[in-house]
Image (cartoon, helix red, strand yellow):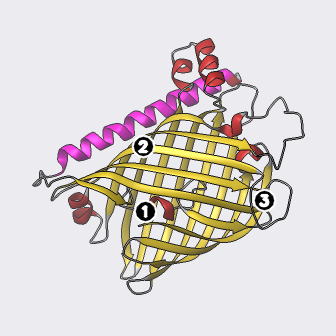
Amino acid sequence: MTARARSWLGGVAGLAALGSLGGGVAMIDAVARPGRAEAAEWLQLGSRALPRGAWADPDAPATGIAYGPRASSRAGADVALVTWRSDERTRRLGLSAVVGFDNAVTRSPLAGELGRTAVELAIASSFDGWAARHLGARGVLELGLAVGRRSAFSTERYLLGDAPRADDVPFGAGGSYLGLDAAARTGLRAAWDLGVRLALRAYLNAFPDLVGSREASDVVADSLHEGAEWQGSVEARVDRRFGARARGYLSLYAEAIAPHDDSAKGLWLGRLEAGVALTSNALEVAFFVAGEAGHGPSLLVNQTELRLLGGVKIYAR
């Protein structure tokens, strides 16, 4: 099977997954009991029922620093622009953004050689009544639809010196995308919770490729600086609560990226993160250690690395 055929089949599978997840939103929304609608609430911290910044995804909207063996920092925000609540469900229109910096060569504790950005506008529906009946008192089920943009760049402190290889993924494997995600949480025991999150992103160059227009797909990828065509991720985490204001957690995150170019290699990343989170009414701060294997950050995405790092992050609840 040729690389193009594999890409096409992967695209069909990804589109089917997009459709299935979208159909799941409609199905659960249809079976959820109607509830009394309430007035819209404007500009609140946190655009999801389960905090986006708490997940181990490197692009999660959190503010923090990490080190090992290179410095990394990011500043993130996650805001619900408008929230609609009823007895059975909560809908949120949210905006999240992250600006991150990583070092490529220097061991300085201040990151600044490479940069990355991620911006996402999403509508999410949390099925509160259904989750309480089927997943327990702490149960959560939320589905979201998003449009976003990921990009990577080099600062004046660092210039990429190596010539690109034939199988490199350009533009830091970024681009503009349409995404779907699903997140759920259920209580395991009195103080234990299990959470799972699935996400799929289809970059804009994937859609002309699905209908056989490879030239149009190339034009979209080149003009919008898109190196990836599909991206999928899955994360599972276990939380142990210690009272109302503290908890420990262990999270396993994995992602795979299918490139646009047939000659480019596929990318993958695995991350195991453990930490302690302290909670306030609006924010959480987490102290963590993590092990990573797979592609590098930002424009180092074509490097395969093994990293052990520790850090702290703050995010909206």
Quadrant housing the N terminus? top right
Image point (84%, 33%), residue name = 164
Distance of label 1 from label 3 (alpha carbons): 27 Å
Residue 13 is covered by the magenta coloring: yes
Percent position (x, y) of residue 42?
Answer: 27, 54
Mark before the other along the chain sequence, 2 or 1:
1
Percent position (x, y) of residue 271?
Answer: 65, 60
Q: 10 Å neighbourhood of mark 1: few (<14), some, or many (≥20)?
A: some
Secondary structure beneath dot 3 equals: strand
Q: Which residues are magenta?
A: 4-32
Percent position (x, y) of residue 270?
Answer: 66, 56
Relative depth, front residue between 86 and 197? 86
Residue placed under numbered mark 1 in the picture = 51
Position of 217 relative to 76 (above/below): above
Position of 200 relative to 277 (above/below): above
The kind of residue on which mark 1 rests is Pro
Residue placed under numbered mark 3 in the picture = 306
Residue placed under numbered mark 2 in the picture = 121
Quadrant housing the C terminus? bottom left
Mark before the other along the chain sequence, 3 or 2:
2
Distance of label 3 from label 2 (alpha carbons): 32 Å
Position of 277 relative to 176 (above/below): below
Q: 10 Å neighbourhood of mark 2: few (<14), some, or many (≥20)?
A: many
Left or right of residue 47, residue 7 in this image: right
Secondary structure beneath dot 1 equals: loop
Please tell me whether mark 2 or mark 1 is closer to you in this view.
Answer: 2
Percent position (x, y) of residue 213?
Answer: 57, 12
Image point (64%, 35%), residue name = 258
Farthest-out residue, bottom? 243
Image point (42%, 43%), residue name = 121
Relative depth, front residue between 256 and 92? 92
